[in-house]
Amino acid sequence: MAREFNVPSFYRSPLITRVKLARRLEDPRKKDLSPSILDFGPVRYLIARHFGFCYGVENAIEIAYRAVEEQQGRRVFLLSEMIHNPHVNEDLLARGIRFLRTTTGEQIIPFAELTKEDVVIVPAFGTTLEVEQLLQERGIDTMQYNTTCPFVEKVWKRSDQIGNKDYTIVVHGKRFHEETRATFSHAQKHAPVVVVRDIDEAEILATFVREERSAEEFFRVFADRYSDGFDPSNDLKRIGVVNQTTMLASETQAIASLLRDAIVARYGEDGANDHFADTSDTLCYATNENQSAAHALVDHGADLAIVVGGYNSSNTSHLVELCQEKMPTYFVRDAGEILSRQEIRHFDLHQSREILTQGWLEMRDVEAGGNSDSGRPLDIVLTAGASCPDALLDQVIERINGWFDVVDAKTALEPFEEVTA
């Protein structure tokens, strides 16, 4: 049986949590990726099979709230945002926790102000060895409330293993994301490291793997993304790929395949096993499940998609990308961004900013007959990132339902009540 975490009840929801429970009971082996359908009559929500709080996030939330409860009277700090969801982080701030750094590493409160009486929570992304040392020098126990995701730690352990066998670590990730900064730090303890952001950068790296090119060109192309002392003429002869766990799993696999092909081109198939380490076991199960469920959602088809999550959440942004391939998609932090059936404020990944879209719902409503008897239901894909509370999706449903003559929630939940009864 999967471990149950002590997560505050206000993050749960009457609708979404019930749907999730029914699907778990109905499909314990998680083989059915088809969406759950919440049918309110004129509007239907296609709910992803997998989404929302994952193991690592629930573990982090449980530890953080326990720290608040156990350490009353002491100062409690978080290194940075515990997870990339503004609602969770704002609630922790309201309970007295203070952030030491921004998500990009800028210092808010100097470590010099900390004492051994203070409590510091390490976020789910983990932290660098350098930061750990600085905190320990201040007398801080960095393990007391360490919320580092076990699947992030798995990547670190695998990096250690192959690094100790003289492989260079290629990290698929965003170089200055908290998790990638931490993985980079841990990996370079045992091996040279280089970071690639995507398949395009991996293609460039593959040219250096296939044949020796000038070091100056490598350092120019991969500036700020390689470890000290990196020697491209020697350090790209034996490589292994690991990833920031929130990246697209399919892209990590494609990058690994691409770089293995480059190794084969240089050393032949017989030499591939000696020059390329198999690291496929480092892919995060939750990221993979959420992305596979998103693929099933868009393949099912709908009129539009709403993805809920923090705008700086990497795993959420990848769900948005998947949905955008097939339908109009709106990335919102919560129901408050859905201003009316005419206007929605949402985050545009390409512009990296919030934008306002007019007629987002009205256009579809008119085309399909909307709430009229002759019109088919409005189908809305609804999913969320791994750090998004279920309760936020309930609020989105409630917000949109307010514009339609819908059946009550009890009626919409009847198919799921039969499973959980």
Image (cartoon, rainbow, N blue to C red):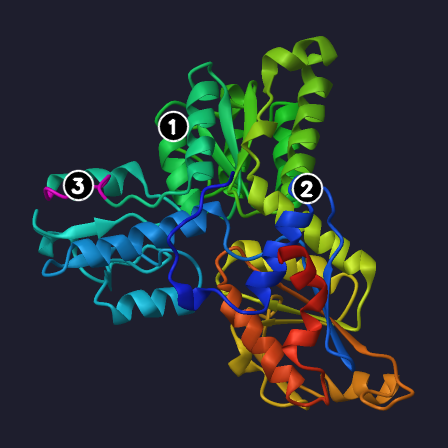
Can you tell which of label 2 and label 1 is closer to the viewer?
A: 2
Q: Could you tell me if the residues under marks 2 and 1 are in contact, i.e. CB atoms within 8 Å? A: no
Which residue is at the front of the view, 21 or 321? 21
At which x and y percent is residue 94? 27, 71
Name the residue carrying label 2: 250
> Which span is picked out in magenta?
138-144
**Residue at the spot of label 3:** 141
Asked where in the image residue 414 lies, by quadrant, the reply is bottom right
The alpha-carbon separation of the residues under discs 2 and 3 comes to 37 Å
Q: Is residue 378 above or below residue 92?
A: below
Amino acid marked by disc 3: Asp
Where 19 falls versus 161 (above or below)? below
**Helix, strand or loop at disc 2?**
helix
Could you tell me the amino acid type at mark 1? Answer: Gly
Q: How far is the residue under mark 2 from the one under mark 1?
A: 31 Å
Earlier residue among tags 2 and 1: 1
Residue 382 numbered tag: none
Residue 359: % across, % down: 72, 88
Question: In the depicted view, which residue is nearer to us: 49 or 171?
Answer: 49
Q: In which quarter of the image is residue 228?
A: top left
Q: Position of residue 211 (x, y in %)?
A: 65, 23
Residue 229: numbered disc? 1
Considering the numbered disc 1 on the image, is that residue within a helix, a strand or a loop?
loop
Q: What residue is drawn where x is 60% and y is 57%?
A: 20
